[in-house]
Amino acid sequence: MQSLVTILLVCFVALALVALALWQKYRSERTARERTERESEESRDWLDLIQTKTPVMIHVVDGNGCLVAVSDEWLERLGYTRQEVIGKQFTTFLAEGSILQCPGDDCSKYSCPGLCKEVSLQIVKRDGQCLDVLFSAIAERDPGGELFQSFAIVTDITVQKQTTFALQQAQNELEERVQSRTVALDEAYEHLALEMKERKRAEVILHTIAEGVSGTTGIAFFASLVQYLSKVLDMDHAMIGIFDEQEEGKVQTVAISSHGQSQENFNYDLAGTPCAKVTDQGMCLYPQNVAQLFPEDSMLLSMGIESYIGSRLDDSSGAPIGLLVVMGSSPVETSGTVTSMLRIFAGRVAAELERLKHDDEMMQVRNLESLGRMAAGIAHEVNNPLTNASINIQMLRKKLGFLENNTPILQRVEAIERNIERASNIAKGLLLFSHQKELELVQVDPTEIVDKAFTQITSDLERITLHKEMLSVSEILGDPLKLEGVFINLFNNAIDAMPDGGTLSVASFEEGGKVVIKIHDTGCGIPREHLSKVFDPFFTTKDVGVGTGLGLSIVYGVVRQHHGTIEAAGSSNKGTTFVVKLPIFSSLSGSQ
Protein backbone atom coordinates (compact mmCIF):
# COMPACT_ATOMS: atom_id res chain seq x y z
CA MET A 1 0.00 0.00 0.00
CA GLN A 2 2.75 2.28 0.92
CA SER A 3 4.48 1.39 -2.31
CA LEU A 4 1.41 2.29 -4.24
CA VAL A 5 1.24 5.63 -2.52
CA THR A 6 4.84 6.19 -3.29
CA ILE A 7 4.30 5.30 -6.91
CA LEU A 8 1.31 7.62 -7.14
CA LEU A 9 3.29 10.40 -5.48
CA VAL A 10 6.10 9.95 -7.95
CA CYS A 11 3.65 9.98 -10.82
CA PHE A 12 2.05 13.14 -9.50
CA VAL A 13 5.40 14.87 -9.16
CA ALA A 14 6.26 13.77 -12.66
CA LEU A 15 3.00 15.08 -14.00
CA ALA A 16 3.55 18.31 -12.13
CA LEU A 17 6.99 18.69 -13.65
CA VAL A 18 5.63 17.94 -17.09
CA ALA A 19 2.85 20.45 -16.61
CA LEU A 20 5.35 23.03 -15.40
CA ALA A 21 7.56 22.35 -18.39
CA LEU A 22 4.62 22.68 -20.75
CA TRP A 23 3.57 25.93 -19.10
CA GLN A 24 7.01 27.35 -19.31
CA LYS A 25 7.18 26.36 -22.97
CA TYR A 26 3.82 27.94 -23.62
CA ARG A 27 4.84 31.13 -21.88
CA SER A 28 8.11 31.17 -23.78
CA GLU A 29 6.38 30.67 -27.13
CA ARG A 30 3.78 33.29 -26.27
CA THR A 31 6.46 35.75 -25.28
CA ALA A 32 8.33 35.05 -28.50
CA ARG A 33 5.15 35.44 -30.54
CA GLU A 34 4.32 38.71 -28.83
CA ARG A 35 7.86 39.95 -29.38
CA THR A 36 7.67 38.95 -33.04
CA GLU A 37 4.33 40.70 -33.45
CA ARG A 38 5.70 43.74 -31.68
CA GLU A 39 8.81 43.75 -33.84
CA SER A 40 6.67 43.26 -36.95
CA GLU A 41 4.55 46.19 -35.91
CA GLU A 42 7.64 48.28 -35.30
CA SER A 43 9.03 47.18 -38.67
CA ARG A 44 5.81 48.21 -40.37
CA ASP A 45 5.95 51.57 -38.62
CA TRP A 46 9.60 51.96 -39.63
CA LEU A 47 8.89 51.06 -43.25
CA ASP A 48 5.95 53.46 -43.27
CA LEU A 49 8.24 56.14 -41.86
CA ILE A 50 10.78 55.42 -44.59
CA GLN A 51 8.25 55.40 -47.39
CA THR A 52 6.06 58.33 -46.50
CA LYS A 53 7.70 60.54 -43.95
CA THR A 54 11.31 60.77 -45.25
CA PRO A 55 12.01 63.65 -47.64
CA VAL A 56 15.09 61.95 -49.15
CA MET A 57 15.65 59.09 -51.57
CA ILE A 58 15.80 55.92 -49.42
CA HIS A 59 15.23 52.28 -50.24
CA VAL A 60 15.51 48.92 -48.45
CA VAL A 61 16.44 45.62 -50.09
CA ASP A 62 16.26 42.11 -48.68
CA GLY A 63 18.97 39.51 -48.64
CA ASN A 64 18.29 38.70 -52.30
CA GLY A 65 18.75 42.32 -53.35
CA CYS A 66 15.06 42.88 -54.00
CA LEU A 67 13.46 46.18 -53.08
CA VAL A 68 11.11 45.86 -50.13
CA ALA A 69 10.63 49.54 -49.40
CA VAL A 70 11.24 52.85 -51.20
CA SER A 71 10.54 56.41 -50.11
CA ASP A 72 8.03 58.64 -51.89
CA GLU A 73 10.93 60.99 -52.81
CA TRP A 74 12.66 58.00 -54.46
CA LEU A 75 9.58 57.25 -56.55
CA GLU A 76 9.00 60.93 -57.44
CA ARG A 77 12.56 61.51 -58.60
CA LEU A 78 12.64 58.37 -60.74
CA GLY A 79 9.04 58.50 -61.94
CA TYR A 80 8.02 54.99 -60.91
CA THR A 81 5.08 53.73 -58.84
CA ARG A 82 5.62 51.57 -55.77
CA GLN A 83 3.99 48.58 -57.47
CA GLU A 84 6.53 48.83 -60.35
CA VAL A 85 9.58 48.55 -58.08
CA ILE A 86 8.73 46.51 -54.94
CA GLY A 87 10.01 42.97 -55.28
CA LYS A 88 12.41 43.79 -58.13
CA GLN A 89 16.17 43.72 -57.76
CA PHE A 90 17.69 47.15 -57.38
CA THR A 91 20.39 46.35 -59.93
CA THR A 92 17.78 46.18 -62.70
CA PHE A 93 17.34 49.95 -62.36
CA LEU A 94 21.04 50.73 -62.80
CA ALA A 95 22.34 52.17 -66.08
CA GLU A 96 24.71 50.12 -68.14
CA GLY A 97 28.21 50.83 -67.00
CA SER A 98 27.28 51.58 -63.37
CA ILE A 99 29.06 48.99 -61.22
CA LEU A 100 28.63 48.74 -57.48
CA GLN A 101 31.95 48.79 -55.72
CA CYS A 102 31.12 47.92 -52.12
CA PRO A 103 33.71 46.69 -49.63
CA GLY A 104 31.25 44.23 -47.96
CA ASP A 105 30.76 40.50 -48.68
CA ASP A 106 29.18 39.38 -51.97
CA CYS A 107 29.03 42.87 -53.40
CA SER A 108 28.80 41.54 -56.91
CA LYS A 109 25.72 39.45 -56.07
CA TYR A 110 23.66 41.70 -53.88
CA SER A 111 23.01 45.38 -53.86
CA CYS A 112 25.33 46.68 -51.20
CA PRO A 113 25.13 43.86 -48.64
CA GLY A 114 28.24 45.26 -46.98
CA LEU A 115 29.16 48.91 -46.32
CA CYS A 116 29.11 51.41 -49.20
CA LYS A 117 29.72 55.14 -48.96
CA GLU A 118 29.05 57.72 -51.74
CA VAL A 119 29.46 55.42 -54.74
CA SER A 120 28.77 57.30 -58.00
CA LEU A 121 26.00 55.58 -59.98
CA GLN A 122 23.45 56.29 -62.68
CA ILE A 123 19.85 55.11 -62.12
CA VAL A 124 17.56 54.80 -65.14
CA LYS A 125 14.38 56.79 -64.70
CA ARG A 126 11.02 55.62 -66.01
CA ASP A 127 11.33 57.98 -69.05
CA GLY A 128 14.66 56.41 -69.97
CA GLN A 129 16.87 59.28 -68.84
CA CYS A 130 19.66 58.71 -66.33
CA LEU A 131 19.87 60.28 -62.92
CA ASP A 132 23.33 60.85 -61.48
CA VAL A 133 23.42 59.86 -57.78
CA LEU A 134 25.73 59.15 -54.88
CA PHE A 135 24.87 55.78 -53.28
CA SER A 136 25.51 55.02 -49.56
CA ALA A 137 24.24 51.83 -47.81
CA ILE A 138 24.72 49.56 -44.81
CA ALA A 139 23.76 45.85 -44.60
CA GLU A 140 22.17 44.05 -41.64
CA ARG A 141 22.82 40.37 -40.67
CA ASP A 142 20.83 37.95 -38.49
CA PRO A 143 22.36 36.24 -35.43
CA GLY A 144 23.54 33.45 -37.70
CA GLY A 145 25.49 35.91 -39.85
CA GLU A 146 23.13 35.71 -42.81
CA LEU A 147 22.35 38.91 -44.76
CA PHE A 148 18.69 39.69 -44.48
CA GLN A 149 18.34 43.39 -45.51
CA SER A 150 20.23 46.52 -46.63
CA PHE A 151 19.33 50.14 -45.96
CA ALA A 152 20.45 52.69 -48.61
CA ILE A 153 20.38 56.48 -49.04
CA VAL A 154 20.52 57.83 -52.62
CA THR A 155 21.53 61.50 -53.20
CA ASP A 156 20.67 63.25 -56.47
CA ILE A 157 23.86 64.97 -57.73
CA THR A 158 22.63 65.98 -61.22
CA VAL A 159 22.90 69.72 -60.53
CA GLN A 160 26.18 69.22 -58.73
CA LYS A 161 27.56 67.19 -61.61
CA GLN A 162 26.35 69.74 -64.15
CA THR A 163 27.95 72.49 -62.10
CA THR A 164 31.16 70.49 -61.83
CA PHE A 165 31.08 69.88 -65.59
CA ALA A 166 30.48 73.57 -66.27
CA LEU A 167 33.30 74.49 -63.91
CA GLN A 168 35.58 72.01 -65.64
CA GLN A 169 34.63 73.44 -69.01
CA ALA A 170 35.25 76.95 -67.74
CA GLN A 171 38.59 75.85 -66.35
CA ASN A 172 39.53 74.18 -69.64
CA GLU A 173 38.43 77.26 -71.56
CA LEU A 174 40.41 79.47 -69.21
CA GLU A 175 43.47 77.28 -69.64
CA GLU A 176 43.01 77.42 -73.43
CA ARG A 177 42.71 81.20 -73.29
CA VAL A 178 45.76 81.48 -71.09
CA GLN A 179 47.62 79.20 -73.48
CA SER A 180 46.37 81.18 -76.46
CA ARG A 181 47.30 84.48 -74.85
CA THR A 182 50.67 83.06 -73.92
CA VAL A 183 51.25 82.04 -77.54
CA ALA A 184 49.99 85.45 -78.69
CA LEU A 185 52.33 87.20 -76.25
CA ASP A 186 55.22 85.07 -77.47
CA GLU A 187 54.35 85.93 -81.06
CA ALA A 188 53.95 89.61 -80.16
CA TYR A 189 57.32 89.54 -78.44
CA GLU A 190 58.93 87.93 -81.48
CA HIS A 191 57.19 90.45 -83.74
CA LEU A 192 58.30 93.31 -81.49
CA ALA A 193 61.85 92.00 -81.49
CA LEU A 194 61.76 91.74 -85.29
CA GLU A 195 60.22 95.20 -85.55
CA MET A 196 62.90 96.66 -83.30
CA LYS A 197 65.53 94.96 -85.42
CA GLU A 198 63.93 96.35 -88.59
CA ARG A 199 63.65 99.78 -86.96
CA LYS A 200 67.33 99.75 -86.04
CA ARG A 201 68.12 98.71 -89.57
CA ALA A 202 65.93 101.51 -90.89
CA GLU A 203 67.67 104.00 -88.60
CA VAL A 204 71.05 102.84 -89.89
CA ILE A 205 69.82 103.14 -93.47
CA LEU A 206 68.37 106.59 -92.90
CA HIS A 207 71.51 107.76 -91.13
CA THR A 208 73.77 106.38 -93.84
CA ILE A 209 71.77 107.88 -96.70
CA ALA A 210 71.28 111.19 -94.89
CA GLU A 211 75.03 111.49 -94.35
CA GLY A 212 75.68 110.55 -97.95
CA VAL A 213 73.33 113.06 -99.53
CA SER A 214 73.55 115.89 -97.01
CA GLY A 215 74.71 119.15 -98.48
CA THR A 216 73.64 118.21 -102.02
CA THR A 217 70.70 119.50 -104.01
CA GLY A 218 69.27 119.12 -107.47
CA ILE A 219 70.82 116.61 -109.85
CA ALA A 220 73.74 115.96 -107.46
CA PHE A 221 71.24 115.00 -104.74
CA PHE A 222 69.45 112.59 -107.07
CA ALA A 223 72.72 110.98 -108.20
CA SER A 224 73.93 110.51 -104.62
CA LEU A 225 70.59 109.21 -103.42
CA VAL A 226 70.25 106.41 -106.00
CA GLN A 227 73.79 105.24 -105.28
CA TYR A 228 73.27 105.12 -101.51
CA LEU A 229 69.82 103.57 -101.84
CA SER A 230 71.09 100.69 -103.95
CA LYS A 231 74.02 100.21 -101.56
CA VAL A 232 72.26 100.20 -98.18
CA LEU A 233 69.19 98.30 -99.44
CA ASP A 234 71.45 95.71 -101.08
CA MET A 235 69.85 96.22 -104.49
CA ASP A 236 71.74 96.24 -107.78
CA HIS A 237 69.95 99.11 -109.48
CA ALA A 238 68.17 102.32 -108.46
CA MET A 239 66.73 105.14 -110.52
CA ILE A 240 64.65 108.30 -110.37
CA GLY A 241 62.40 109.14 -113.31
CA ILE A 242 59.95 111.93 -114.09
CA PHE A 243 56.86 111.70 -116.27
CA ASP A 244 57.39 113.28 -119.66
CA GLU A 245 55.16 116.37 -119.90
CA GLN A 246 55.44 116.45 -123.68
CA GLU A 247 54.63 112.80 -124.43
CA GLU A 248 52.10 110.98 -122.26
CA GLY A 249 53.08 107.47 -121.18
CA LYS A 250 56.83 108.12 -121.21
CA VAL A 251 59.34 108.47 -118.36
CA GLN A 252 62.58 110.45 -118.48
CA THR A 253 65.21 109.32 -115.97
CA VAL A 254 67.13 111.98 -114.05
CA ALA A 255 69.48 109.71 -112.07
CA ILE A 256 70.48 106.03 -112.45
CA SER A 257 72.81 103.83 -110.41
CA SER A 258 73.72 100.33 -111.59
CA HIS A 259 76.07 98.20 -109.46
CA GLY A 260 77.27 101.34 -107.71
CA GLN A 261 78.04 103.28 -110.91
CA SER A 262 76.15 106.23 -112.36
CA GLN A 263 74.62 105.55 -115.78
CA GLU A 264 73.52 107.74 -118.67
CA ASN A 265 69.89 108.87 -118.52
CA PHE A 266 67.30 107.69 -121.02
CA ASN A 267 63.53 107.70 -121.59
CA TYR A 268 61.22 104.71 -121.91
CA ASP A 269 57.57 103.78 -122.39
CA LEU A 270 55.49 102.94 -119.32
CA ALA A 271 53.24 100.46 -121.13
CA GLY A 272 53.83 96.84 -120.12
CA THR A 273 56.27 97.69 -117.30
CA PRO A 274 55.94 97.42 -113.51
CA CYS A 275 56.39 101.20 -113.45
CA ALA A 276 52.92 101.49 -115.01
CA LYS A 277 51.53 99.62 -111.99
CA VAL A 278 53.37 101.99 -109.67
CA THR A 279 51.85 104.95 -111.50
CA ASP A 280 48.36 103.57 -110.87
CA GLN A 281 48.79 102.13 -107.35
CA GLY A 282 51.40 104.39 -105.75
CA MET A 283 53.62 101.57 -104.45
CA CYS A 284 54.42 98.12 -105.88
CA LEU A 285 56.57 95.29 -104.53
CA TYR A 286 57.57 92.28 -106.63
CA PRO A 287 59.94 90.21 -104.44
CA GLN A 288 60.75 87.76 -107.24
CA ASN A 289 60.00 86.69 -110.86
CA VAL A 290 59.24 90.27 -111.95
CA ALA A 291 60.66 89.62 -115.46
CA GLN A 292 58.23 86.73 -115.91
CA LEU A 293 55.33 88.85 -114.63
CA PHE A 294 56.07 91.58 -117.21
CA PRO A 295 57.30 89.78 -120.35
CA GLU A 296 56.76 92.90 -122.49
CA ASP A 297 59.47 94.75 -120.55
CA SER A 298 62.57 93.56 -122.39
CA MET A 299 64.84 95.68 -120.18
CA LEU A 300 64.03 93.55 -117.13
CA LEU A 301 65.05 90.38 -118.94
CA SER A 302 68.21 91.84 -120.50
CA MET A 303 69.37 93.20 -117.12
CA GLY A 304 68.55 89.97 -115.29
CA ILE A 305 66.12 91.70 -112.90
CA GLU A 306 64.48 89.36 -110.36
CA SER A 307 62.98 91.76 -107.80
CA TYR A 308 61.43 95.22 -108.13
CA ILE A 309 60.17 97.85 -105.68
CA GLY A 310 58.79 101.17 -106.86
CA SER A 311 57.18 104.23 -105.29
CA ARG A 312 55.34 106.98 -107.12
CA LEU A 313 56.47 110.58 -106.66
CA ASP A 314 53.62 113.02 -105.97
CA ASP A 315 53.90 116.79 -105.75
CA SER A 316 52.40 118.88 -102.94
CA SER A 317 48.99 118.88 -104.64
CA GLY A 318 48.99 115.08 -104.93
CA ALA A 319 49.62 115.00 -108.68
CA PRO A 320 51.99 112.23 -109.90
CA ILE A 321 55.27 113.60 -111.23
CA GLY A 322 57.66 110.64 -111.32
CA LEU A 323 59.00 107.35 -109.90
CA LEU A 324 61.61 106.12 -107.44
CA VAL A 325 62.62 102.51 -108.20
CA VAL A 326 65.08 99.93 -106.85
CA MET A 327 65.71 96.59 -108.60
CA GLY A 328 67.75 93.50 -107.78
CA SER A 329 69.05 90.40 -109.55
CA SER A 330 67.96 88.17 -106.65
CA PRO A 331 64.76 87.84 -104.59
CA VAL A 332 64.19 90.47 -101.92
CA GLU A 333 62.72 90.16 -98.42
CA THR A 334 59.12 91.23 -98.07
CA SER A 335 59.75 93.15 -94.83
CA GLY A 336 58.47 96.70 -94.60
CA THR A 337 61.90 98.29 -94.22
CA VAL A 338 62.61 98.69 -97.93
CA THR A 339 59.13 99.97 -98.79
CA SER A 340 59.17 102.34 -95.82
CA MET A 341 62.54 103.75 -96.88
CA LEU A 342 61.30 104.19 -100.42
CA ARG A 343 58.21 106.06 -99.22
CA ILE A 344 60.32 108.36 -97.05
CA PHE A 345 62.79 109.22 -99.80
CA ALA A 346 60.06 109.39 -102.43
CA GLY A 347 58.63 112.33 -100.49
CA ARG A 348 62.06 113.94 -100.31
CA VAL A 349 62.72 113.42 -104.04
CA ALA A 350 59.28 114.78 -104.98
CA ALA A 351 59.89 117.88 -102.86
CA GLU A 352 63.28 118.42 -104.52
CA LEU A 353 61.79 118.01 -108.01
CA GLU A 354 59.07 120.50 -107.14
CA ARG A 355 61.64 122.92 -105.74
CA LEU A 356 63.74 122.69 -108.91
CA LYS A 357 60.67 123.32 -111.04
CA HIS A 358 59.75 126.32 -108.91
CA ASP A 359 63.33 127.62 -109.12
CA ASP A 360 63.22 127.28 -112.90
CA GLU A 361 59.95 129.20 -113.02
CA MET A 362 61.33 131.92 -110.76
CA MET A 363 64.48 132.12 -112.89
CA GLN A 364 62.32 132.49 -115.97
CA VAL A 365 60.30 135.24 -114.26
CA ARG A 366 63.49 137.08 -113.27
CA ASN A 367 64.87 136.69 -116.78
CA LEU A 368 61.65 138.03 -118.22
CA GLU A 369 61.78 141.01 -115.86
CA SER A 370 65.37 141.71 -116.87
CA LEU A 371 64.51 141.34 -120.53
CA GLY A 372 61.51 143.58 -120.02
CA ARG A 373 63.65 146.38 -118.67
CA MET A 374 66.14 145.90 -121.48
CA ALA A 375 63.33 145.72 -124.05
CA ALA A 376 61.87 149.00 -122.79
CA GLY A 377 65.22 150.70 -123.22
CA ILE A 378 65.73 149.26 -126.70
CA ALA A 379 62.21 150.22 -127.77
CA HIS A 380 62.69 153.82 -126.71
CA GLU A 381 66.09 154.00 -128.41
CA VAL A 382 64.74 152.47 -131.63
CA ASN A 383 61.46 154.38 -131.82
CA ASN A 384 63.05 157.79 -132.50
CA PRO A 385 65.20 156.65 -135.45
CA LEU A 386 62.25 154.68 -136.80
CA THR A 387 60.03 157.75 -136.63
CA ASN A 388 62.61 159.84 -138.52
CA ALA A 389 63.12 157.07 -141.07
CA SER A 390 59.37 156.81 -141.62
CA ILE A 391 59.05 160.60 -142.13
CA ASN A 392 61.98 160.66 -144.53
CA ILE A 393 60.71 157.70 -146.55
CA GLN A 394 57.32 159.40 -146.92
CA MET A 395 59.03 162.61 -148.14
CA LEU A 396 61.16 160.58 -150.53
CA ARG A 397 58.05 158.85 -151.93
CA LYS A 398 56.47 162.30 -152.60
CA LYS A 399 59.56 163.46 -154.45
CA LEU A 400 59.58 160.27 -156.49
CA GLY A 401 55.93 160.52 -157.30
CA PHE A 402 56.73 161.18 -160.99
CA LEU A 403 58.17 157.66 -161.32
CA GLU A 404 56.10 154.85 -162.65
CA ASN A 405 55.04 151.99 -160.39
CA ASN A 406 57.22 148.91 -160.06
CA THR A 407 60.36 150.74 -160.99
CA PRO A 408 63.44 149.43 -159.14
CA ILE A 409 63.68 152.60 -157.07
CA LEU A 410 60.05 152.44 -155.88
CA GLN A 411 60.42 148.72 -155.16
CA ARG A 412 63.36 149.50 -152.90
CA VAL A 413 61.42 152.29 -151.21
CA GLU A 414 58.53 149.88 -150.53
CA ALA A 415 60.96 147.31 -149.08
CA ILE A 416 62.34 150.03 -146.78
CA GLU A 417 58.76 150.89 -145.71
CA ARG A 418 57.98 147.25 -144.92
CA ASN A 419 61.12 146.87 -142.80
CA ILE A 420 60.41 150.14 -141.00
CA GLU A 421 56.87 148.88 -140.24
CA ARG A 422 58.22 145.54 -139.02
CA ALA A 423 60.79 147.27 -136.82
CA SER A 424 58.04 149.53 -135.50
CA ASN A 425 55.88 146.49 -134.67
CA ILE A 426 58.82 144.92 -132.86
CA ALA A 427 59.30 148.10 -130.86
CA LYS A 428 55.60 148.14 -129.97
CA GLY A 429 55.86 144.51 -128.92
CA LEU A 430 58.87 145.30 -126.77
CA LEU A 431 56.99 148.10 -125.07
CA LEU A 432 53.96 145.87 -124.51
CA PHE A 433 56.22 143.12 -123.13
CA SER A 434 58.05 145.49 -120.80
CA HIS A 435 55.04 147.39 -119.46
CA GLN A 436 53.18 144.89 -117.25
CA LYS A 437 50.43 147.18 -116.09
CA GLU A 438 48.32 146.52 -113.03
CA LEU A 439 45.43 144.17 -113.73
CA GLU A 440 41.85 145.38 -113.57
CA LEU A 441 40.49 142.34 -111.75
CA VAL A 442 36.82 141.36 -111.76
CA GLN A 443 34.92 138.10 -111.45
CA VAL A 444 34.70 136.58 -114.92
CA ASP A 445 33.45 133.39 -116.51
CA PRO A 446 36.35 131.68 -118.34
CA THR A 447 33.94 130.19 -120.89
CA GLU A 448 32.76 133.66 -121.92
CA ILE A 449 36.38 134.85 -122.23
CA VAL A 450 37.18 131.94 -124.58
CA ASP A 451 34.03 132.55 -126.68
CA LYS A 452 34.87 136.26 -127.06
CA ALA A 453 38.43 135.41 -128.07
CA PHE A 454 37.10 133.18 -130.87
CA THR A 455 35.11 136.08 -132.33
CA GLN A 456 38.28 138.19 -132.62
CA ILE A 457 40.49 135.63 -134.38
CA THR A 458 42.06 137.25 -137.44
CA SER A 459 43.15 134.02 -139.16
CA ASP A 460 41.19 132.20 -141.83
CA LEU A 461 38.85 129.66 -140.15
CA GLU A 462 37.40 128.05 -143.29
CA ARG A 463 40.00 125.28 -143.36
CA ILE A 464 39.79 124.63 -139.59
CA THR A 465 37.43 122.25 -137.79
CA LEU A 466 36.54 123.53 -134.34
CA HIS A 467 35.86 121.02 -131.55
CA LYS A 468 34.73 122.40 -128.18
CA GLU A 469 34.17 120.55 -124.87
CA MET A 470 33.52 123.48 -122.57
CA LEU A 471 32.10 122.24 -119.28
CA SER A 472 30.43 124.60 -116.83
CA VAL A 473 33.20 125.91 -114.58
CA SER A 474 33.50 128.32 -111.65
CA GLU A 475 34.30 131.98 -112.05
CA ILE A 476 37.85 133.28 -111.75
CA LEU A 477 39.31 136.65 -110.75
CA GLY A 478 40.90 138.19 -113.82
CA ASP A 479 41.37 141.04 -116.27
CA PRO A 480 38.95 140.26 -119.14
CA LEU A 481 40.85 142.17 -121.85
CA LYS A 482 44.23 140.66 -121.01
CA LEU A 483 42.80 137.15 -120.73
CA GLU A 484 41.12 137.59 -124.12
CA GLY A 485 44.51 138.54 -125.50
CA VAL A 486 46.02 135.35 -124.07
CA PHE A 487 43.51 133.08 -125.82
CA ILE A 488 43.51 135.11 -129.06
CA ASN A 489 47.29 134.64 -129.24
CA LEU A 490 47.04 130.91 -128.52
CA PHE A 491 44.22 130.39 -131.07
CA ASN A 492 46.06 132.31 -133.82
CA ASN A 493 49.25 130.32 -133.19
CA ALA A 494 47.30 127.05 -133.36
CA ILE A 495 45.63 128.06 -136.65
CA ASP A 496 48.95 129.23 -138.12
CA ALA A 497 50.39 125.79 -137.30
CA MET A 498 47.76 124.18 -139.60
CA PRO A 499 48.22 125.87 -143.03
CA ASP A 500 46.68 122.89 -144.79
CA GLY A 501 43.75 122.62 -142.39
CA GLY A 502 43.17 120.56 -139.25
CA THR A 503 41.27 120.44 -135.99
CA LEU A 504 41.40 122.98 -133.19
CA SER A 505 40.12 121.49 -129.91
CA VAL A 506 39.27 123.50 -126.81
CA ALA A 507 38.25 121.92 -123.51
CA SER A 508 37.59 123.31 -120.04
CA PHE A 509 37.10 121.62 -116.66
CA GLU A 510 37.98 122.02 -112.97
CA GLU A 511 40.86 120.23 -111.24
CA GLY A 512 42.43 120.82 -107.83
CA GLY A 513 40.81 124.20 -107.19
CA LYS A 514 41.71 125.51 -110.66
CA VAL A 515 39.98 126.05 -113.98
CA VAL A 516 41.88 124.15 -116.67
CA ILE A 517 41.63 125.18 -120.34
CA LYS A 518 43.31 122.93 -122.92
CA ILE A 519 43.97 124.12 -126.46
CA HIS A 520 45.14 121.46 -128.93
CA ASP A 521 45.88 121.63 -132.63
CA THR A 522 46.71 118.91 -135.15
CA GLY A 523 49.35 120.99 -136.87
CA CYS A 524 53.06 120.53 -137.43
CA GLY A 525 53.82 120.45 -133.71
CA ILE A 526 56.85 121.72 -131.82
CA PRO A 527 60.08 119.70 -131.73
CA ARG A 528 60.97 118.37 -128.29
CA GLU A 529 64.16 120.43 -128.11
CA HIS A 530 62.16 123.65 -128.61
CA LEU A 531 59.42 123.05 -126.00
CA SER A 532 61.46 124.44 -123.13
CA LYS A 533 62.08 127.67 -125.07
CA VAL A 534 58.63 128.56 -126.43
CA PHE A 535 58.00 131.13 -123.68
CA ASP A 536 61.40 132.80 -124.09
CA PRO A 537 61.31 136.32 -125.57
CA PHE A 538 62.18 136.54 -129.28
CA PHE A 539 62.03 132.74 -129.72
CA THR A 540 59.91 131.72 -132.69
CA THR A 541 59.61 128.74 -135.01
CA LYS A 542 58.02 130.84 -137.75
CA ASP A 543 59.83 131.97 -140.86
CA VAL A 544 62.04 135.04 -140.76
CA GLY A 545 59.99 138.16 -140.93
CA VAL A 546 56.84 136.42 -139.65
CA GLY A 547 56.11 137.23 -136.01
CA THR A 548 58.25 138.89 -133.37
CA GLY A 549 58.76 135.96 -130.96
CA LEU A 550 57.18 137.93 -128.14
CA GLY A 551 53.59 136.61 -128.26
CA LEU A 552 53.99 133.59 -125.98
CA SER A 553 56.29 135.54 -123.66
CA ILE A 554 53.51 138.10 -123.17
CA VAL A 555 50.98 135.26 -122.70
CA TYR A 556 53.24 133.70 -120.07
CA GLY A 557 53.54 136.98 -118.19
CA VAL A 558 49.79 137.63 -118.18
CA VAL A 559 49.00 134.10 -116.91
CA ARG A 560 51.59 134.48 -114.15
CA GLN A 561 50.02 137.81 -113.16
CA HIS A 562 46.76 135.90 -112.66
CA HIS A 563 48.52 133.41 -110.31
CA GLY A 564 48.14 130.75 -112.97
CA THR A 565 50.38 128.45 -114.99
CA ILE A 566 50.76 127.63 -118.67
CA GLU A 567 52.48 124.57 -120.10
CA ALA A 568 53.22 123.40 -123.63
CA ALA A 569 53.29 119.78 -124.75
CA GLY A 570 53.53 118.06 -128.09
CA SER A 571 55.80 116.58 -130.72
CA SER A 572 56.65 117.14 -134.34
CA ASN A 573 53.96 114.70 -135.55
CA LYS A 574 51.17 114.92 -132.95
CA GLY A 575 50.39 118.62 -132.89
CA THR A 576 50.69 120.93 -129.90
CA THR A 577 48.76 121.31 -126.66
CA PHE A 578 48.77 124.37 -124.41
CA VAL A 579 47.31 123.94 -120.90
CA VAL A 580 46.29 127.07 -119.00
CA LYS A 581 45.41 126.73 -115.30
CA LEU A 582 43.81 129.64 -113.43
CA PRO A 583 42.75 129.57 -109.76
CA ILE A 584 39.04 129.55 -108.98
CA PHE A 585 37.89 132.78 -107.39
CA SER A 586 36.93 131.17 -104.03
CA SER A 587 40.23 129.27 -103.69
CA LEU A 588 42.24 132.33 -104.65
CA SER A 589 40.41 134.41 -102.04
CA GLY A 590 41.10 131.75 -99.41
CA SER A 591 44.81 131.68 -100.18
CA GLN A 592 45.05 135.46 -100.08
Image (spheres, grey):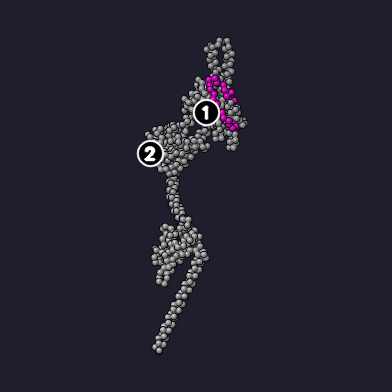
Closest to the observer, 178 or 70: 70
Closest to the observer, 109 or 267: 109
Say what secondary structure mark 2 lies in.
loop
Tag 2 residue: 329
| Amino acid type, mark 2 | Ser
Quick check: 224 left or right of 518?
Answer: left
| Amino acid type, mark 1 | Phe
Say what secondary structure mark 1 lies in.
strand
Tag 1 residue: 578
Closest to the observer, 446 or 14: 14
Instruction: Give the x, y percent position of residue 251.
Output: 45, 33
Q: Which mark is residue 480?
A: none
Q: Which residues are magenta?
A: 452-478
Measure the C-alpha gap from mark 1 to mark 2: 42 Å
Q: Quadrant of the N terminus?
A: bottom left
Q: Is residue 368 magenta?
A: no
- The answer to which image quadrant residue 114 occupies is bottom left
Residue 252 makes an appearance in the image: no
Residue at x 58% of width, y 16% of height: 394
- Above or below: residue 19 compared with residue 413: below
